[in-house]
Image: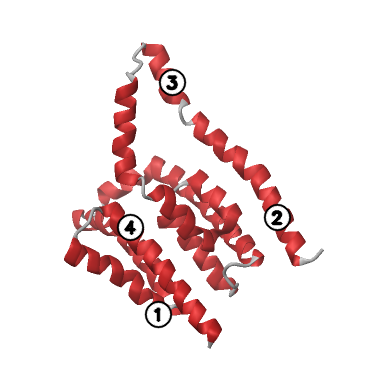
Amino acid sequence: MDMDALTAKWKRSCNFIGMPTNLLAAATSFLPVLWLCWTYSCWPELDVVLKAWGLVAASFGAFYFVEPISYYSVVGLSGTYLVFLSGNIGNMRIPCAAQALDATKTEPGTLQAEVVSTLGICGSIITNLVAVALAACVGASVVAMLPKVVSDAFVKYAAGAIFGGTFGNFAIKYPKIAIFGIGIPWALLTYVKPPAYVTIIAAVFGTILIARIFYSLEKKA
């Protein structure tokens, strides 16, 4: 079987399993709310539901488009289904997938890269489940024993450290693109100060456009 046929078979299998699984997860996520409304007869009015959804969409609507597009090159089709089903995408799944690609020296965008990143994501999900279970059992007591400066650092800087490490990992490989990746949001936040969703969209798609330009120039050279 050649690579094109193997890739097509892989994608069919991913869609066959991933699509209904994600749709089922989306549907069943409403069950707790429906149970509460049914049990206590507290059905909200439609306009209240739409207003609540509108507030969420205004804050996070940009991610509906940005995350699937920007993450696809790292996690591939199978990884996309996995990360949106399991959550913790930017702070855990993407770094683990990126490190798996880096450790195996796999070229991004290939079927091999998709398999490797999927295995990395699966490993992170299993580790995450174990860590969350332990944290739920003993985490609060351990954090309470730590000095306040340490516990505050976990809250304030953990996410930034993860994202910074991920950015640094890619910046070493693609330094020219990294300049624009951090320069575009910095310029917008410093001089324009647009809403957060505008900055996110401009940073992601602006960097993708710059990367495409560099890729085209290298191919011509």
Question: Marks 3 and 4: which is nearer the front?
Answer: 4
Q: Helix or strand or loop: what does disc 1 sit on?
A: helix
| The residue positioned farthest toward the right in the image shown | 1
Please tell me the numbered disc located at residue 157: none
Picture quadrant of residue 121: bottom right
Q: Which residue is mark 4?
A: 200
Classify residue 132 as left or right of residue 79: left
Instruction: Tell me if mark 1 has few (under 14), some (14-19) or many (20+) residues whose alpha carbon lies within 10 angstroms of its own.
Output: few
Q: Helix or strand or loop: what does disc 3 sit on?
A: helix
| The residue positioned farthest toward the bottom in the image shown | 221
Classify residue 2 as left or right of residue 158: right
Question: Marks 4 and 1: which is nearer the front?
Answer: 4
Q: Which residue is mark 1?
A: 175
Label whose residue precedes the other's in the sequence (2 or 3):
2
Please tell me the numbered disc located at residue 10: 2
Q: Amino acid at mark 4?
A: Ile
Instruction: Tell me if mark 4 has few (under 14), some (14-19) or many (20+) residues whose alpha carbon lies within 10 angstroms of its own.
Output: some
Task: Give the CA separation, mark 1 to mark 3.
Answer: 49 Å
Q: Residue at x 70, y 49 (%)?
A: 13
Q: Helix or strand or loop: what does disc 4 sit on?
A: helix
Label whose residue precedes the other's in the sequence (4 or 2):
2
Tag 1 and tag 2, C-beta contact below 8 Å: no
Q: Which residue is mark 3?
A: 34
The location of residue 126, given as percent across then percent down, is 54, 50
Q: Residue at x 46, y 62 (%)?
A: 95
Q: Amino acid at mark 2?
A: Trp
Q: Nearer the viewer, residue 4 or 99?
A: 4
Q: Residue at x 40, y 41 (%)?
A: 136
Task: Give the CA separation, mark 3 to mark 4.
Answer: 33 Å
Tag 4 and tag 1, C-beta contact below 8 Å: no
Label whose residue precedes the other's in the sequence (1 or 3):
3
